[in-house]
Amino acid sequence: MTNIQELAAKTGVSVATVSRALNGSPEVSNATRDRILSLAEELDYTPSAAARTLVSRRSHVVGVILETGPGHPHLLHPFFQEVLVGLQHGAGARGYDLLLFASDEPGSGFGGAHSYVRRAEHHGVGGVVVMGFDGRHPEMRKLVASGMPCIAVDSDVAGKRCGSVTSDNRDGAFQAVAHLHEVGHERIATIAGPLGTRPGAERLAGYRAALEQLGLPSPDEYAIEGDFYAESGYRATRELLELAEPPTAVFAASDMMAAGALRAAHELGARVPDDLAVVGFDDIALAALIQPPLTTVRQNMEALGRAAADGLIRMIEDPDAPAGEVHVPARLVVRVSSGAKQAPREEAHEIAKEVEARLGDGRSGPSSDDGAALVKDEGNTEEA
Amino acid sequence: MTNIQELAAKTGVSVATVSRALNGSPEVSNATRDRILSLAEELDYTPSAAARTLVSRRSHVVGVILETGPGHPHLLHPFFQEVLVGLQHGAGARGYDLLLFASDEPGSGFGGAHSYVRRAEHHGVGGVVVMGFDGRHPEMRKLVASGMPCIAVDSDVAGKRCGSVTSDNRDGAFQAVAHLHEVGHERIATIAGPLGTRPGAERLAGYRAALEQLGLPSPDEYAIEGDFYAESGYRATRELLELAEPPTAVFAASDMMAAGALRAAHELGARVPDDLAVVGFDDIALAALIQPPLTTVRQNMEALGRAAADGLIRMIEDPDAPAGEVHVPARLVVRVSSGAKQAPREEAHEIAKEVEARLGDGRSGPSSDDGAALVKDEGNTEEA
DNA sequence: AGCCGTTCCGGAAACGTTTACGGTCGCAAT
DNA sequence: ATTGCGACCGTAAACGTTTCCGGAACGGCT
C-alpha cells in the first residue's frame, strides 16, 4: 500500500505538503499540488482511514443501530430496509460510510456485551442513527445521556443531541380520511396502531382531525386500537361490521391491519370496496398485490433515511447544531380498495415512472425476484 | 476519553503492560492483570479502533457491498435484507462489525467515484461480502483480481480469494418437483429463471434431474425461461395451459413468477391447485398471503448471511484458507397451492414455533407492521 | 559462586496521518 | 536599506495502540 511518505519522497516535498495538497489546502502552489495529485492518482494512493481518524478524531463514518435479536423482528420489515437505502445515499453523498453495529465483544478481556455508546466511541463514529428502538429502552437512555449526536427514525426518543425523523403521520392519516370522504363516505372508522407508539398516536390524531374538519360523525366505537398486525385488523373489522350502524369505510393505520380487514370483510360477505372501503398505511410491497389492490398512504422511506443522514451529519459537523425533528411527507396512493372511480391520470403515470426507476436493468439481476418491492401494480389490470 | 496511558499511570505500570493485560497475554502476572482490568472497567475504558487498526493492520470490520443506485433495485428485495441480518449475527459472533460502503468520495481532491477495492483498503477492512452483483461486472473483476478476500452471495463470481455462498438451488428445485410428484402429478412443467444467472441455471438443473430420476416425461415445451418477475410467469403459464397436452403442475423458479402463474390460471379458469398445482421458490413474505397460499421452497437467508460471514472471516484470519463454495440447504414449505392433502403435523408445528421466534415481543414494536415477514399463514384458515 | 531459564515488565519504535509552528523567500512599501 | 507581509514549504509533535527487544529479579542447577 502506498502511503503519504512515498508520495513525499517521489515528488521531492515533505509529507506535510503532500497532506495539504491532498486536502485542498490553499497553502500549496498550484504547480506542486498538480504534481502531487497526479502522482497520487497514478500510484492509486488511498489514505488510511485509521490514521486519519486517529489524529483528526473524526471518522467519516456514522453508526447504525438496529436491534435484530430474538424479540426484535423489526429489522425484517421492509420499512427499515428501505430506510437503510436512504441512509446509504444520504450519507454517501456527504462522504460518509455506514457502520452496522453487530459485534457484542469488540476487543476481549472485558466481560459482557458492550453498550452501543461504547461501541460507537470505540469506532470513533461521530454519531448514530437508531431504528427499531423506542425511547424507553435503557440503551437509548444511555445514548441520549451520553451526548453523542443521534437521530431516531420513526420513534420518539429525543434529547439535546438527539433528533428524530418520521413520516408526517398526521397528515398522511388526514389525507386518507379526506380521500374516503371525497369518494362519498360519511361513516368512516379507524383501526389505530398502538397508542403508546408515536406513529400509532399520530395517525389517530390525523384521523380525528380530518373527521372534525370535514364535519363527520366520530362515535367512539369507530376507533379501535390494534397492534399494527394483521390479526388485530381482522378482529377490529369484525367488531365494526357488527355495529348497529356499521361504517362504510375504514382507515387502517398499517397495511397489515388493512389486509386483516379485507379478510374479515370477505368472511362477512362485505364486498370491498363496494360495501366497505379500506385504506391502509405504509405501502408495503404486499399492498399492490393483494385482492383488491390496497389504497394506502405511502411512506417515503428512502427520504426518511436521507433526512436522517442529513440531520445527523449536520449535527456531527456543527457541534452546536440543534437536534431537530423532521417530518417527511407521506402521500396517498390510490388503488382499488377505496373505491375511487378511477385513478387520476397523472397518478398512473407517476407510478409507471417510479416502477421504471426502481426496476432499471433489473433483467440482468442476480437472482430471485425483486418484484415484491416494485410490482407493476398487477392488480390494476383487474379494472380492464 | 480515557486511554491506555491513563490506565498505565493510574496502575503504576507501563503502557506495554497494560496493552498486554488487555489482550490477555500470558506475560503478565495475575495480580497486575486484575488490577488493570478492574480499573479499565471502572473508568469505562474503550480502546481506540483507529489506533489499533493503524498498527495491527486488521480492523475487525468486514465490508459489505451492495449496489443500490438506479438500475439496482436488488437491495430492495427482502432477500438481501434477511441476508444482511444473517451477516450481522455471523460477524457479530466473531467480534466483527459491518461497514456498508456508501460514500463515493471519501477524502477529497481526487476525482470520480472510488472503486470498491480502494474503499475497502482505505478502511482497512480485511475482506468484503458482495451482494447483488454478477461476476461480469467490472468492479467485481477488479475485486477478485485485487486478491482481497471476498464472498459473493447468490452469485457466480469466483476466484482465488473469492468464495461464494448460495442456497442449494438444485436440491430445492428437486424437492419441489418430488413433492409435486408425490401428490400425484406426472406432467410437471417449469418456469425457469434466466439461464444466464446462477440460480436460474441451477434450479432448472434440479428440475431436470428430478424428472429424470422419477421417470417423468420432460418435453421441451414444458420448460420456459422467465426472468424471475411476475409478468414472465404470467405469460409462461398462458403458454403452458394452451399446449395440446398441458401440464397439471408447474414449478416456478421464483415466487413472483409463481404469483404470475396464479393470475394466469385464474384468468384461464384453471383452479389452483385442483386444475393446476403451483410451487414457487424463495418464500418471500407475499407467498403466504396470496390466494391460494403458495407452496414454495424457502431459502434460509439468515443462514446464507451467517455462512458468508463465517467464510469470509475464516479467510481473513487465515491468509491461506481456501475460498470455498458453500451451499445452504433450502426446504420445502407446503401450503395450499400445490394441492397437498394436508400439511403434515410437524410442519405446522414448526411454522408456529418459527413465527413465535420471529415475532417475539413484537407488540412493543415501534411502528408499522412487521407482519409482512412473519405472517401466521393466515391463508391456511381457508381450509377450516 | 557461577550459570541458565523463567517470569515479569519497561523502553521505544512503528503505524500513517494532521497540524501548529517556524522558516525562507521575493517583493512592495516605507 | 530596512521593514513587513504574503506565499509557500519543512520540522516535528501528536494521536493511541501493538510489539520487538532487552533487562531485572529470582530460583534452581552444576
Image (spheres, coloured by chain):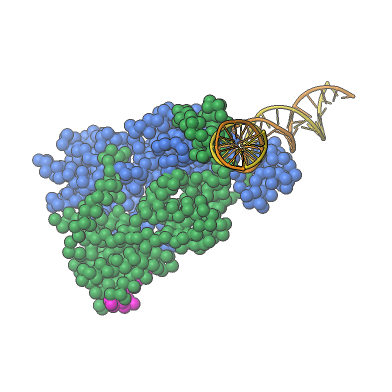
Chain colours: A green, B blue, C orange, D yellow
Q: Nearer the viewer, residue A255 or A135?
A: A135
Residue at 28 percent of width and 47 percent of height: A357
Residue at 49 percent of width and 62 percent of height: A158
Q: Nearer the viewer, residue B245 or C24?
A: C24
Q: Nearer the viewer, residue B345 or B271?
A: B271
Q: Position of residue D7 (x, y in %)?
A: 53, 37
Q: How many marks?
A: 0
Q: Position of residue A72 (x, y in %)?
A: 44, 55
Q: Report if residue B177 is visible in the image.
A: no
The answer to if A221 sits in the magenta stretch is yes
Q: Is residue B194 left or right of residue C23?
A: left
Q: Is residue A87 left or right of residue B222?
A: right
Classify B234 as above or below A158: above
Q: Nearer the viewer, residue B234 or B249?
A: B234
Which image quadrant for residue B171? top left
Residue at 36 percent of width and 44 percent of height: B68
Q: Report if residue B152 is visible in the image.
A: yes
Classify A288 as above or below B127: below
Q: Is residue B186 left or right of residue A75?
A: left
**The C terminus of chain A: image quadrant:** bottom left
Q: Position of residue A44 (x, y in %)?
A: 46, 30
Give the residues in magenta.
A215-226
Residue at 39 percent of width and 47 percent of height: A89
Q: Position of residue A85 (x, y in %)?
A: 38, 48
Classify A279 as above or below B26: below
Furthest residue toward left: B244
The answer to if A183 sits in the magenta stretch is no
